[in-house]
Image (cartoon, rainbow, N blue to C red):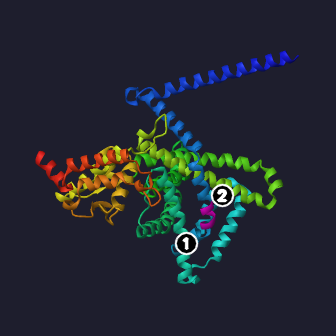
């Protein structure tokens, strides 16, 4: 009996091992089919299919990585804190234009997937907004109100910057001006578009055209597509404006279309889920509506971030790779990149050309912005480069280029990352190691001598 059980267990183990090997082989074959060919060598139909599947695979990898999930959940928390102040500011602006009554239908449309619960949530939020009297808050209360609204937009920008691999937020003054422009002008433009659309649809000419078949059916179908187009246009505008980098129109439109379709589709699916989720009401009682609202907010932010990720991959297809792209700079590459950037800054400064920006650096060097920005930050922190207040900011020498010795520049780059608790002096003293490192230092000094950054630029000019 015991021998039989052992034999069965061994056979089961062998079968599982064979199944595991078969799954791995199938995975490897699929990966080879997906990644082995260069896209430019494929026909147009196959190239479109392969590129789309690759983007889906990379998006799935991003989701499994967890960073987008964490940022979506963080935005849910910030939204709960900021939704009433945000709508209060928008309500006050729209009231000045006499269209504040349209705020509630838009909120109802956003919360429509919650079903009857959405109407209750919308009424409560509108009630809170109407109780917020912006005119009687006082200067301090108004400042805190605007700060709460701006903090939400800043959180959104930070999440979008993560997607676009940008480490730097906008300057504080520009942050307030840009964010408030969107918050104050955006609702007016949106409701103006809705009003113009409704006015055009009610004109006698359009009504007459609707009565003419089959043209009328086309117009009615087009009118039903207008909400989708407005959502796509809103997402496209967000993708172009919010990230602190230049986003091209085509990638933003592609991301907007993907996010818009996903958002509408998920709205229908979530509405069906809410209609059949009677168990939630039984378990959570009065908290069920809050749970459903949190889930819908999370899905909405997740879709918005996924659309931004799609736009990023469309603009930077070199990131769509089988393995995740990492930007751990080697010491040699960091030294080379620092010297290259300093040369470019000094060359334009000495010859009176327009200063370089981060985007211009990345495009000229053919590198992602993240490693370029890392080295630029190092050059700024060590006093070699200064950043202008322009938008986007440009970079100029902070010191006279005749006083920047190449040996000192390389020494600063080599010592980057050292701190009070982790320096060369904190390592045990070893004579042989000290002699070897001193030989390296003397060799650098001997070869570079007193050469400065200006000598490097003048030498290049003389050669050309």
State the image coordinates of residue 256 (x, y, percent, origin top left). 49, 49
* Label 2: few (<14), some (14–19) or many (≥20) C-alpha neighbours in 10 Å: many
Q: Which mark is residue 111?
A: 2
Q: CA distance from mark 1 to mark 2?
A: 20 Å
Q: Secondary structure at mark 2?
A: loop
Position in image of residue 289 (x %, y %) = 74, 59
Magenta-colored stretch includes residue 9: no
**Percent x, y for residue 364?**
29, 47
Query: In the image, is 19 to the left or to the right of 202?
Result: right
Mark 1 neighbour class, 10 Å CA radius: few under 14, some 14 to 19, many 20 or more: many
**Where does the magenta region start and end?**
77-82
User: Is label 1 in a helix, a strand or a loop?
Assistant: helix
- Of helix, strand and loop, which mostly describes the magenta segment? helix
Q: Where residue 220 appears, x then y in whole percent?
A: 56, 48
Q: Nearer the viewer, residue 169 or 40?
A: 169
**Which residue is nearer to you in this view: 24 or 338?**
338
Out of 416 and 134, give the one closest to the viewer.
416
The answer to whether residue 278 is left or right of residue 83 is right
Q: Is residue 5 left or right of residue 42?
A: right
**First of labels 1, 2 by sequence position:** 1
Which of the labelled discs sits on residue 89, or is there none?
Answer: 1
Do the CB atoms of the residues marked 1 and 2 lie less than 8 Å apart? no
């Amino acid at each position: 009996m015991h021998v039989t059980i052992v034999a069965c267990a061994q056979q089961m183990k062998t079968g599982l091992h064979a199944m595991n090997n078969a799954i791995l082989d199938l995975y490897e074959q699929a990966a080879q089919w997906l990644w082995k060919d260069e896209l430019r060598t494929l026909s147009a139909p196959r190239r479109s299919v392969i590129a789309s599947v690759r983007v889906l695979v990379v998006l799935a990898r991003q989701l499994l990585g967890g960073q987008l999930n964490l940022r979506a959940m963080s935005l849910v928390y910030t939204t709960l804190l900021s939704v009433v102040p945000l709508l209060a500011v928008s309500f006050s602006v729209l009231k000045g234009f006499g269209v504040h009554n349209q705020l509630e239908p838009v909120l109802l449309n956003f919360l429509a997937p919650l079903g009857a619960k959405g109407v209750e949530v919308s009424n409560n939020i509108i009630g809170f907004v109407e109780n917020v009297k912006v005119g009687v808050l006082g200067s301090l209360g108004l400042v805190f109100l605007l700060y709460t609204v701006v903090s939400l937009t800043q959180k959104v920008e930070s999440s979008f910057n993560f997607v676009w691999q940008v480490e730097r937020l906008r300057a504080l003054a520009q942050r307030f001006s840009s964010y408030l422009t969107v918050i104050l002008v955006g609702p007016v433009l949106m409701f103006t578009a809705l009003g113009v659309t409704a006015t055009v649809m009610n004109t006698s000419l359009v009504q007459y055209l609707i009565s003419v078949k089959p043209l009328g059916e086309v117009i009615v179908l087009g009118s039903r597509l207008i909400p989708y187009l407005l959502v796509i246009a809103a997402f496209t505008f967000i993708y172009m404006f919010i990230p602190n980098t230049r986003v091209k129109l085509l990638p933003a439109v592609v991301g907007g279309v993907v996010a818009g379709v996903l958002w509408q589709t998920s709205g229908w699916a979530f509405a069906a889920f809410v209609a059949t989720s009677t168990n939630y009401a039984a378990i959570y009682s009065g908290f069920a509506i809050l749970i459903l609202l949190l889930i819908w907010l999370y899905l909405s932010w997740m879709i918005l971030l996924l659309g931004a990720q799609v736009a990023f991959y469309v603009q930077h297809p070199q990131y769509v790779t089988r393995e995740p792209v990492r930007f751990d700079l080697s010491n040699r590459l960091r030294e080379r990149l620092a010297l290259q950037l300093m040369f470019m800054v000094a060359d334009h400064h000495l010859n009176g050309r327009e200063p370089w920006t981060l985007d211009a650096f990345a495009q000229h060097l053919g590198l992602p912005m993240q490693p370029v920005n890392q080295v630029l930050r190092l050059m700024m922190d060590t006093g070699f480069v200064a950043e202008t207040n322009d938008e986007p900011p440009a970079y100029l020498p902070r010191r006279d280029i005749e006083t920047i010795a190449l040996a000192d520049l390389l020494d600063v780059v080599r010592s980057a990352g050292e701190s009070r608790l982790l320096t060369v002096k904190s390592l045990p003293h070893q004579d042989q190691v000290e002699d070897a490192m001193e030989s390296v230092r003397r060799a650098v000094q001997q070869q570079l001598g007193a050469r400065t950054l200006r000598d490097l630029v003048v030498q290049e000019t003389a050669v050309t």
